[in-house]
Amino acid sequence: MMRHDKEKKRQKLINKLIFLNVYNKEDQQLYQMPLSKLEYEYRRFQLQNHPHGEFGSIQLI
């Protein structure tokens, strides 16, 4: 059961990374990455494309 959940999560991340043009769907390296590496790549993409960069969101005091 848990293995199936991890595989579903891996596939979702692969699909997101392809959709966001981080990777090409023909890139075999993408399909061989472990879940932890896919999560890292997705987080890195989100940080690079966040309007506040690496500083997170700006909070008003």
Image: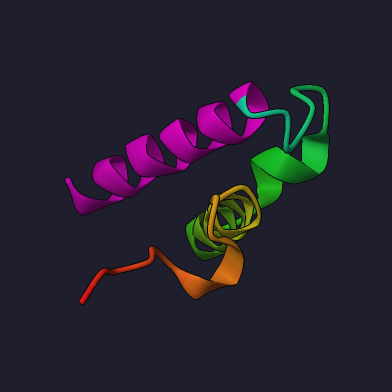
Quadrant of the rendering where the N terminus is positioned: top left
- Residue drawn at x 72%, y 28% as measured from the top left: 21
Residue 7 to residue 18: above or below: below
**As drawn, 1 above or below 14:** below
Q: Nearer the viewer, residue 4 or 51?
A: 51
Residue nearer the viewer, 16 or 60: 60
Q: Position of residue 18 (x, y in %)?
A: 65, 27
Looking at the image, the residue that sits furthest to the front is 61
Closer-to-camera residue (1/29):
29
Query: Residues in magenta?
Result: 1-19
Residue 55 location, x and y as percent? 51, 73
Q: Determine the residue positioned at 62% across, 47% down.
A: 49
The quarter of the picture where the C terminus appears is bottom left
In the image: residue 16, left or right of residue 1: right
Residue at (28, 40) in percent of width and height:
4
At 56% from the left and 53% from the top, the residue drawn is 38
Q: Position of residue 28 (x, y in %)?
A: 80, 36
Which scheme is used to colour this image of the protein? rainbow
Q: Is residue 12 magenta?
A: yes
Q: Position of residue 47 (x, y in %)?
A: 57, 59
Residue 12 occupies quadrant: top left
- Look at the magenta stretch and give its main secondary structure: helix
Horizontal relation, residue 37 to residue 12: left or right = right
